[in-house]
Structure formats: structure tokens, C-alpha cells
Image: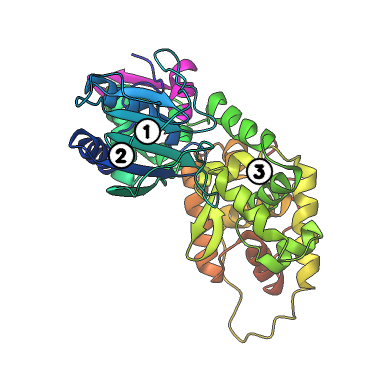
Amino acid sequence: MGVGPGRHPQRGREPETRRVSEALDCACTGGNALMHVVGPRGMGKTRLLQEAAETARRRGFRLLRGEPPAAADGAPGDPVPTLVVVDEPFHPGGGWRQPAPGPRPSSHTVWITASPPGRPPRRADGIDVPPFLCTTRLVLGPLSRSAARDLASDLLDARLDASLLRLLEQAGGHPALLIELLRGLQEEGGVRTVSGVAELVTSHVSEPARFYVRDTLAGSSALCRQLLCLMAVLDDGAGPETLGRLLDISVAALIPVLEEAYATGLLHDRDGAPAFVSLLARCLVAETIPRSLRTALLRERAALDGPPPPHHDDRPAPELDERQRLLLRLVAEGLTNQEMAGRLRLSPHTVNYHLRKLFRTFSVGSRIDLLNAAARAGIPTAPDPRDPER
């Protein structure tokens, strides 16, 4: 069976689905409940609302969108439990009825709303409800490693081999990106199942995963796209002051831009600073930028920091082998991990492993700092005619 968003979509979201059931229980016993689902694009907000509606339907609830009905359809004294979904992008399909004006019910009703992070829940105009007996706020983020593995195993209906697991870990637990990556691998023959084990045939990133990221960028404002592209090229290595100078805006003006970037689902907060939710997301954003522009951005960032100070350290420069020196030159060209992998005929996972070793060798945390440290150590990073071509 092929991968699709309708199959095991909420694997790893069991705590959230339990909270939905608790809210429905509250309505069944005569109370009312409010549930607000918060999460960026691709984390499963709309899908959770759809599953809540399906669960409520099976339990005999009336399903509505926007606001509750004027009165219950059941006989007096026998109210019908109602689920009201308030979600701007949610398209519920058949079986949903529009509400009529009039008095609002005081019990047996669950309101469930959804919104991106940083945006308050949307309520339909005119809703006036009594205090809720059950109020819940669900925050959806990336799946844990085990939950992402279980989701992938369910979608492929097979256990996963080690090479496939390593590739999927690059999705960073982003549900939509993981699903698109798997769907593309199946469509493009990049994965096969042998004796109940899904094996990776090729490590290239599938086209649906690329399209998902490009579509996310296309739906963002120009300034948000600039921010995401800058962070992708600079490898999360730029602080707010540097980003503001490169974008030609104040640090204060970065606040709404970062809020929008978080809402795309491509960025999240890591230890109090914005960072890409996954290595795959960062590489796919960087791939949308021409290589010559990536190189120019790296140089512009380095120029903002000023020329690297002279090397006065008494310690000798690190001893690098030819592969490490080659990786340094490819970093200076602005290549992504995926492009380096294609140039060197290695897997992206292997390239990332060797880059992280270089970071540890130079005690740095970003590509810019790596290039500056290499310059201080007197290690050349200019292209070599003997370097492999595409």
C-alpha cells in the first residue's frame, strides 16, 4: 500500500488524541469544553481536527463548523452532544451543516480551534458561551525519534533497515516532510520491501519532499523567505544582529518575521535561538538558492564579521587529511550537504558526519566560523583544479 496522509496519520500523537476523547467525554456528561490546537504548518493540526470530527461522529455527536446551532435537534431534555470546529484552512467536506442564529447551548458542546504559533485562537463571531468545564491547549511539534520511526514503519507497512532510518532521521520528526519524503521514495523506486524489511535503494531526496519545501517558501512573505534562505546558507550560524544587518532591518523588526518563519514549520526554537527543525529542511531551502549566490552570501557574512585576526596561537594548525581539506573547499563554494554528497559520491549522512568532525576539530558550531578558523590556521579554502566536478 502506498504512502498517503490518510494512513496512520496520527501515529506518535496518542497523548493528543486521548485529550480529545476526554473533551468529548466532558460533553457527553452534560459539560462543555474548549480545546485549542497550536502548531506550525505540517505538524498535523488539521488532521487532528479531522480525526476529532470522525471520533465524534462515531460517538453520535452533531458536527458543525464555525459556531454551535440555535437549538439541539433532539427532543427536549435529550440534548445531542455537539462538536464545533473553528479552523480557517479546514475544509470538512460533506455531512457538516451551517449553524442558525439564536441562543447558544450551555452544555453538551465541545469547541475545538486551531492556529499557528504566536496567533490567538480564532472564534466565530457572536459565540457567547458559559465558562468551560474542560479547557485544553495542545501544542504540536516535531515527533520524537521513536514516534517518527513508528510512523514511517506504519506508512511503509514494514520494518526499516539502518540506511533508511539514517535518511529519515534527517527529517527531524517533521510529520509532513517525513510523509512526503517516503511518498516520493516509493513513487521513484527509492525504497523496496524484502521479507518485511523496507530497504533504501538510493539516498537521493525525493521530489515530493523538495516540492513541499518550495511550496512552503512560496506561501511565505518575501522577508520570511529571505530569512529562511539566509539561515540555510549560514548553517544557523548567524545571530539576530547579523541577520538584521543582512536583511537591512532592525532587530526589533525581526520579531514578526521570525514568528512567520516559525509558523512555516521549517524553523523552531532550539535552546532559545531559531534553528531549522531538521538537516533536511535546511538543505532543501539552501538548494533553492543559486550556488553563486550562496558563495556571495558566505563572503558577505564573513565581511560583516571583519577579516579573521592573525593566527597567534602557539598550537600548531590542525592536521587535516585530503578529504577534510576538500570538504573545506566545498563549504567555501556554498554547497549543501546533498550537493557535496553528489560531488563526492557519498551519502548525505556520511558528509554530515565528516563535517561535524571538522567542527569539533576547530571547536566551532557553524560553517562561517569553520571557514574563519581555517583562514586563521592558514589552511587554503580556494577551489582546486583537481577537485571533483558535478
Mark in front: 1 vs 3: 1
Q: Is residue 387 visible?
A: yes
Circle 2/circle 1 CB separation < 8 Å:
yes
Residue at the disc numbered 1: 48
Task: Mark 2: give few (<14), some (14-19) or many (20+) Cα within 10 Å.
Answer: some
x and y, in percent, of residue 176 in the image: 46, 33
Q: Earlier in the sequence, mark 3 or mark 2?
A: 2
x and y, in percent, of residue 388 in the image: 67, 40
Distance from disc 2 to disc 1, alpha carbons, whole Å, reads 9 Å
- Nearest the viewer among 32 and 265 is 32
Q: Quadrant of residue 355?
A: bottom right
- Amino acid found under the numbered disc labelled 2: Arg
x and y, in percent, of residue 28 in the image: 20, 33
x and y, in percent, of residue 106 in the image: 32, 38
Q: Considering the numbered disc 2 on the image, is that residue within a helix, a strand or a loop?
A: loop
Mark in front: 2 vs 1: 1
- Nearest the viewer among 101 and 247 is 101
Q: Earlier in the sequence, mark 2 or mark 1?
A: 2
**Marking on residue 286:** 3
Q: Considering the numbered disc 3 on the image, is that residue within a helix, a strand or a loop?
A: helix
Distance from disc 1 to disc 3, alpha carbons, whole Å, reads 31 Å
Quarter of the picture holding the C terminus = top right
Q: Which segment did they paint magenta? A: 180-197
Q: Is residue 380 visible?
A: no
Residue at (56% x, 45% y) in the render: 263
Distance from disc 3 to disc 2, alpha carbons, whole Å, reads 30 Å
Q: Considering the numbered disc 1 on the image, is that residue within a helix, a strand or a loop?
A: helix
- Amino acid found under the numbered disc labelled 1: Leu
- Nearest the viewer among 207 and 9 is 9
Residue at the disc numbered 2: 13
